Image: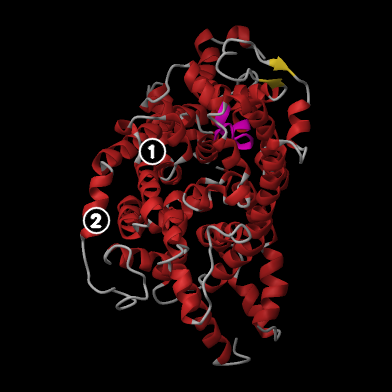
Amino acid sequence: MNKAPGILPRLVTILKIALAVLFLIPLVFTILVSFRPEAEPVTKGSIFFGSEITLVNYQRALVIAPWSLHYLNSFLFVAGTLVVQLATVTCAAYAFARLRFFGRNLLLMIILLQLMIPSGVLLVQNFRMINILGLFDTRIALMIPYWGSAFGVLLLRQAFREIPIELDEAARIDGANLLQVIRHVYVSNAIPAYLAFSLVSVSSHWNEFLWPFIITRSEEIRPLTVGLNKLIKTTDQGAFYGQLMAGTLIVVTPLVILFVLFQRQFVESFARSGIR
Amino acid sequence: MNTSRRPLRSIVIPYLLIAPTLILVLMFNVVPAIRTVNDSLYKPARGLNSAGKPPQFVGMQNFHDIFDDSHYMGTRFLRTFRNTIIFALATVGIGVPLGLLLAILLNREQPLLGLWRFAVFYPSLLPLIGAASIWSFIFSDSIGLANAILKSVGHPGLNWLGDRNLVLASVIIVNIWKQAGYFMIFFLAGLQNIPRDLYEAAALDGADSLQQFAYLTLPLLRRTLLFVIVISFIFAFQTVEQLQALGEGGPADSANLLLYLIFQNISERRNWGYVNAMTIILIGVVLAFTVSNFLLFERDENDS
């Protein structure tokens, strides 16, 4: 860089600003359009604020879908998925990390099949499976395909293996039973891995649309993304983009705030999530 | 193994611990996959009055039909399959280099680093359908931003989500915008692993920035680069939710993608034979990429 002082760093800065602006434009205009009078072209009035600033879009978007209910549903979906995942993943990861048993490698391979054949591509058969189980249009149906997680098992098995086995043995000598050992030796020493797994799980399920859309019918249990879909379909007929952008912001804001709070952990978790 | 001397409890416990995960994976991944293979060989009973009739075994006929351009489902499948490959290649071909560029720009310590990274990373936090909804406004015919910009330079504007030659490109733009920041994360992790003194040594030897990039960064990022390329292909074949807000596959499937075509036919019971055959193709592609991923990167995982 010292070869051409001034020029290259300046070019880099310009490129950086240009890219950031390009990436931010959609978000900025989503926010602006949500406060702009309905169906007003961006060329009318000020390009940024339109002819006036209004909250009408939010008022309209709020009555189209029962958002607080959708929020609750998304929360229950994400939390219900995560809580069960944490339990199943912890048990399996401990067994694969520290116990010897017949068929261990084969059984691990079977579980890893989930990474190769993700349930997301098996829409039709899983739709049938849910119907066979009689779970169609229930909250359980949303969560159950995700309750077992090969990604989580891999991630935690790795974390558990790095915990010195002496800690395990010491706890047992002190009279701890299996569950106490798992809790106090393994879980409490693998918190970063749990956090990584949780952030990946929460963000992917909070954002999920296709499966909840297929497997539920009642508005009472449908998550935010499905509510947003309804708003999109309403907008299709009348180009109510102001109200659609207001609704979109209602849906996407929580995760963005969560990211701002946990930025470093998010980045690390996502870096480990390539094998979801 | 001396199993006979071990107490029964310690033999059973490992299986109890893995049972929940194992059963769930069998129920929602393995069994459905086997069923997909089986059902792809049958033609389901058609129509309402044939309800209760057993499906008819047709061998490879479903596969033959979906690869037959004159068959009603073949036309759709072939076009959609072609789109999916273009979509994947374009996302990877543009999105991955862009992710690498972003990582290089935002790797070193600099003022407001968190803010810069947020600016390019936030799209990957949005639900696909939310991202698509944002872009449905940008691409909107009459009041959209894209056309407002085109009109300001004297262009009459484009029908982004209605012109069959353009819809797929619009969908690709959205996907690149959504994924580039996510790819950047992997490159940032890769760049952190390159020792800083290598660059200092190269600079002492007189290598300029471009040479450092070509002879140092790129070779040392080879593994990361391969990994990102493979996962971005895997994602490209599975991410379709944006179509719900961006033209729903476009006029005459001009921007349809494979998983979305499957989704569109989920309530058409008479097409389930085709849907299963298409799922097999989709699984085949995803499997090929995942397995190559494992062969390339997970070999050292399999110790003990």
The structure residue drawn at horizontal position 30% and vertical position 52%, both measured from the top left corner, is: A250
Provide the chain ID for the residue under circle 1. A
Q: Nearer the viewer, mark 1 or mark 2?
A: 2
Residue B297 visible in image: no
Q: Quadrant of the C terminus of chain B?
A: top right
Identify the amino acid type marked 2. Tyr
Q: Which residue is disc 2 drawn over?
A: A58
- Tell which of B121 and A74 is nearer to you: A74
Residue A244 rendering spot, x and y as whole percentages? 34, 55
Q: Which residues are magenta?
A: A113-124
Q: Quadrant of the N terminus of chain B?
A: top right
Residue B29 rendering spot, x and y as whole percentages? 58, 28
Is A154 placed above or below B250 here?
A: above
> Which SS class for mark 2?
helix
Q: In whole angstroms, how far apart are the C-alphas of marks 1 and 2?
A: 44 Å
Query: Splitting the image into 4 quarters, where does residue B214 fall?
Result: bottom right
Give the left or right position of residue B271, taking residue A225 as reference. right
Identify the amino acid type marked 1. Ser
The structure residue drawn at horizontal position 50% and vertical position 76%, both measured from the top left corner, is: B150
- Tell which of B279 and A275 is nearer to you: B279
Give the left or right position of residue A53, taking residue A182 as reference. left
Q: Which residue is disc 1 drawn over?
A: A188
Crowd rating for badge 2 (residues with CA inside 10 Å; few <14, some 14–19, many 20+): some
Give the left or right position of residue A275, taking residue A34 as reference. right
Main SS, magenta region, reads helix
Disc on res. B229: none
Is A137 placed above or below A19 here?
A: above
Is residue A90 one of those drawn in magenta?
A: no
The structure residue drawn at horizontal position 64% and vertical position 81%, both measured from the top left corner, is: B209
Residue A148 rendering spot, x and y as whole percentages? 49, 29
